[in-house]
Amino acid sequence: MTASSGDGRPGRPLRAKPLRARRPVVDPPPPASDARRPQAIAVADDTPAPDTNEPTAAEIGDAVIFARGLTKRYGTFTAVDNLDLAIRPGEVFGLLGPNGAGKTTTVLMLLGLSEPTEGFARVVGLDPAREPIAVKRRVGYLPDAVGFYGGMTGRDNLRYTARLNGLPRPLAESRIDELLSDVRLTDAADRHVETYSRGMRQRLGIADALVKDPTVLILDEPTIAIDPAGVDEILALLRRLVAEHNLTILLSSHILGQVQSICDRVGFFSAGRIVAQGRLEELRKLAGGGAIAFEVGADGDPAAIEGVLRGVPGVSDVAREPGDRPRWVVHAHHDIAAALTGALSAAGHSIDHLRRRGEDLLEIYRNLVPEERDGRVG
């Protein structure tokens, strides 16, 4: 067969296209079993997987700061070990322990600045490990070493913090004036910070932590390296802030007297663990096993005085202490101070010394924390 060229002339012969063999139609192979199917590649996700052991809302209750089983390890070293903590609104809680006990590590985990190895924390209802920025917006923090721009005034440092936190200028100026007055720095507000004393810097640090109007204030060794007068100023300021603004405060310190003077409850921190926590009265009972001891001194015949003391109802034991002046330690299971005074006076003995042991936080601490684990708290 030929094809016509269109002008009557014969064209080139047509070539038949070779027939290609058709592939047989077969059914697709059955799917491979799960054991032989290629596994999907996991994509890394920065968000921690939810844990079914997370605390429930009922367990947290009204706690502003909550921790359960909070643990931080660095290699084989455990800095914080299985910490349980619950701090209520308007409460001042003191973390008391020597340097290196794990207090600062705990604070950093609560702020979302360090991720726990195990356990859970909630601060104002937020998880610091997952929502650190949100936590920082609602929590004021004063580290042990406050950093300011020395070439800027105190007021300008606070303005800088206000801008970082997105405060409108009029609101920021009003709040800064109020805070400078609160921390007694109004007269020094327009001086360069490099001219401030350590105590003034700490007070400015408290104002800086409060610029964003937080509900929680975390203070890490706020009175370190400050003279006694400066310490008194800062503690008085904190007491006033709690009363006026209903702040919840977590105070980390190794100075017992300061913690005792301001805190509602105290946790004794040692070797990464809270050994005991509670109100002073609760810790006193825990340290004394329920017994109360009084130191008693009085004028008169020692044997007669001891006889009077042993005859006071409620007294369980009387022991004479060595020394030039006669002193006795009287043990009882309830407060018998008034009864001791009355009995000695009725017997004609003038009392020159009466002190209830265990009132001092240092005594309580030493009774509850083994000496070999401590030795650095003062």
Image (tube, rainbow, N blue to C red):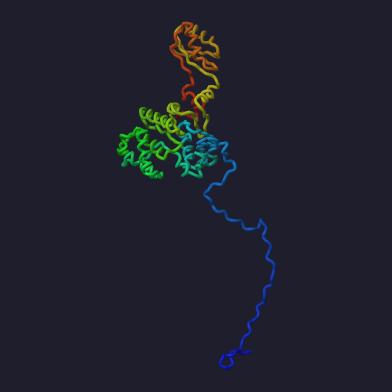
Q: Nearer the viewer, residue 101 or 85?
A: 85
Residue 305 appearing in the image: yes
Report x, y in % for residue 201: 35, 36
In this figure, what is the number of numbered marks?
A: 0
Asked whether, in this view, residue 158 is left or right of residue 297, the answer is left
Measuring from the top left, give residue 270's x and y in whole percent. Answer: 50, 32
Seen from the viewer's position, the closer of residues 93 and 31 is 93
- Give the quadrant of residue 217: top left
Q: Quadrant of the C terminus?
A: top left
Q: Is residue 198 visible?
A: no
Which residue is rendered at x = 53% and y = 16% of the image? 331
Position of the N terminus, as image quadrant, is bottom right
Quarter where residue 235 is shown: top left
Q: Position of residue 37 (x, y in %)?
A: 64, 58
Give me the residue at 46% from left, 23% from top. 360
User: Which residue of the protein is positioned furthest toward the bottom in this rendering?
Assistant: 8
User: Residue 85 location, x and y as percent?
Assistant: 52, 34
Residue 27 to residue 359: above or below? below
Q: Residue at x 54, y 9 (%)?
A: 311
As rendered, which of 324 and 277 lies closer to the eye? 277
